[in-house]
Image: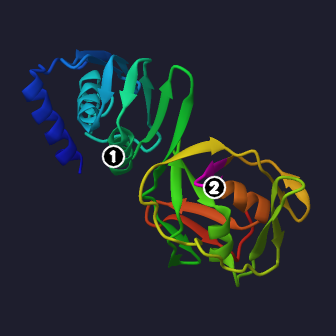
Amino acid sequence: MRKNILSLALALAMCLGLTIPAFAESYTYGYSDGIIITAYSNGSLSYIGAGTLSSDHVNGGIECLDYAGFIIDGSDYVYASDTVSISIGPGITVADDFKEVWYSVSRDLGFSVTFNNSTTAETIASPSNDGLEVNGVVAVPTVYKIGGSNYFKIRDVAAMLNGTEKQFSVGYDGTKNAVTATTGESYDMQSGDLEGPAKGGRSAAASNDAIYVNGEKITAEVYKINGSNYFKLRDLGRALDFYVGWSADRGMYIETGKPYSE
């Protein structure tokens, strides 16, 4: 996928008359349509000027990041923890396909994307390609990556652990604006549980909902994505006492026969 994207970007560069400079800490290119792109080696990217951002400008942004030394890091890969921070200046219109193509690129190349404009900041949850096993069996929950960390829907985790030593029920307390979890209770599957890998990027916002486990409020970093609360797997493992591990061979895994361990 990377080769296809960069081929498109190189073709675009040739059409626009870009020259390929030696790598630098920043690179700026001005389009004839009034859009000016500036990219930096730390992954920051800005679109300023006047005009409409479209999928063509995504290709140009990728190429500018390459020229600035962000994506090409000596091994031709990005790290999963990398984030491209995209600033959009005032007076610019954003076409529908602009962000969707960025979502696709971030998923395929393995980094996160954050959009900012003059008045708001938007956090983007990108589909994660990381695998997960539960007691040695491959699981297919809906997982999003934000800032290099994987976030899981709590109901998916409850569904995966149902019937094991670490099963728990999930509810919602409207008087407390809180998600509730009770260990030892079975979980009733609902429509939308375990729908499989995410199919595109989504906007994410810090959730205002608290979480209580067995009546006790816990601290966790929670994002609201498409109306559901998503948690880091280790935060849930710590709160609900199930083992979370990672290895190069297995990727992420849960073992319900063991307690949580840091």
Q: Is residue 226 left or right of residue 25?
A: right
Q: Which residue is mark 2?
A: 227
For the stretch drawn in magenta, the main secondary structure is strand
**Count of numbered circles in the view:** 2
Instruction: Write the residue at 9% across / 21% down.
Output: 17
Whether the magenta-drawn stretch holds residue 226 is answered as yes
Q: Amino acid at mark 1?
A: Leu
Q: Is residue 91 above or below residue 127?
A: above
Q: Nearer the viewer, residue 80 or 38?
A: 38
Q: Is residue 258 above or below residue 221?
A: below
Q: Nearer the viewer, residue 207 or 21?
A: 207
Q: Residue furthest bottom?
A: 163
Residue 237 x %, y %: 71, 61
- Taking the spot 82% from the left edge, 72% from the top edge, the residue there is 183
Specify the segment rendered in magenta: 223-231
In the picture provided, is 107 more to the left or to the right than 188? Answer: left
Residue found 81% across the figure and 79% down from its top: 185
- The residue that disc 1 covers is 109
Residue 209 drawn above or below residue 136: above
Q: Is residue 51 at all visible to an observer of this figure? A: yes
Question: Mark 1 packing: few (<14 Cα in 10 Å), some, or many (20+)?
Answer: some
